[in-house]
Amino acid sequence: MEPYDRHKPYNQLPPLPPETALYLDKDVMDKMMEAGRLLAELKGLASQLPNQSIFVNTIALREAKASSAIENIFTTDDELYRTLSFQEDEYLDGPAKEILRYRQALWKGYQDVIRDGEITLKTVLDIFHEVKQTHDGIRPYQAEIVIKKRGWGSLIADTAYTPPRGKGVVEAMMKQLLDFLNDDVQYPTDPLLKMAMSHYQFEAIHPFRDGNGRTGRILCILYLVQKRLLDLPILYMSAYILQNKEDYYQKLSGVTGTRNWKEWILYMLESVARTAEYTTYKIKRIRGLMDKFGDIISKDNIIAVRLDLSKLFEQPYIRPKNLISGKIRSVNTAKKYLSQLEALGLLSKDKIGKEYVWFNTELMEILSD
């Protein structure tokens, strides 16, 4: 193997999959089995819920926040959920806006995968366009993109990595990557291993000027949906990566510098295992809180029993107009039901701008810890 020169474009990036001797051993197999088992438990738990979509704005938004924080985009939970509640008006601004774009990108990609049954270049571009709010495509071959070392030091940061460059080079590498992901006949690698390998490859190709990290993390989750290891993109992977950020970048560099595929794959499998476990824990707590609400409403025998309970769990801030349905036909009726729930101690009321909204405090506590 030729020594890697980080100052030169990595046009010799090897195609996937790597030689099995570089990663396939008992440690990897054991971790793969654990991750698969925990993913199956998460999928099974979510499938038992009457409305899985209640996690669209809860778990998916936590993923969006953590993934954006990896890119040093920070916001408070309160700001984030206020923005979610009022995303069509003046509250949509700042870091929370970036996070909502990530969530939109996640769901756009999910719709593409469900429609097409595979991850295509259009899927990748759709995700990137939503993340960055741009119409750009693959970076121009003339663009001299380099990745600088992170952290503090001299005023001029040293180069950590130079991604592939040249006419048609990135496009050809992306085609090979997508073939690897989608063609299980030619590439019969376990999907969890494919996910780990392809995430490194995508970050190494670095197909866009910016937004590669967030786009790549979304693709990881969507690939698990494509392979039916999940029904919905509710895995909270970015939280693990954020908590182990230095290891993430170190092990990425390890594959580039020394072809240390084993440590990278073990890291990614561990991220799946731990975040599947953590997401399962979150869902169980949310489900328990839903049961608590249902019991109290039922015992009190109030008219609010006609509410769609899941509407109270789509996000912590609840606007009366979001409850409008076939059973609740006016904002005033929705306000009446929300006030009854407030009287029971299930919700609290807050004023944002000129409007009163109700707040599911216990849901926020679950999401924030």
Image: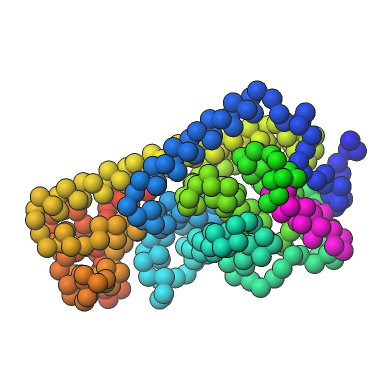
Judge left or right: residue 31 versus residue 346. right
**Above or below for 208 versus 159:** below
Q: Which residues are magenta?
A: 163-181
Q: Quadrant of residue 252?
A: top right
Q: Residue drawn at (22%, 75%), measured in percent from left and top?
A: 329
Tell me: residue 101, above or below residue 18.
below
- Residue 300 lies left or right of residue 85; in this view the side is left
Q: Nearer the viewer, residue 166 or 15?
A: 15
User: Camera-side residue: 309 or 184?
Assistant: 184
Residue 238 in view in this figure: no
Q: Residue at x 36, y 66 (%)?
A: 85
Q: How many callouts does the rendering have?
A: 0
> Residue 133 or 223: which is nearer the viewer?
223
Magenta segment, prevailing SS (helix, strand or loop): helix
Residue 278, horizontal then vertical, whole percent: 44, 39
Residue 239 makes an appearance in the image: yes
- Residue 349 lies in quadrant: bottom left
Quarter of the figure that contains the N terminus: top right
Q: Quadrant of the C terminus?
A: top left
Measured as percent of width and height from the top left, residue 27 is found at 64, 24
Residue 192 included in the magenta stretch of the image:
no
Q: Residue at x 69, y 70 (%)?
A: 136
> Is 171 colored magenta in this rendering?
yes
The image shows residue 130, relative to residue 224, as above or below, that is below
Q: Position of residue 106 (x, y in %)?
A: 53, 59
- How is colour applied across the structure in the image? rainbow
Question: In the visual, does 133 lie left or right of 78?
Answer: right
The residue at 74%/52% (across/down) is 179
Q: Please, which residue is most extreme toward the front here?
A: 185
| Residue that extends furthest to the right in the rendered view of this protein | 2
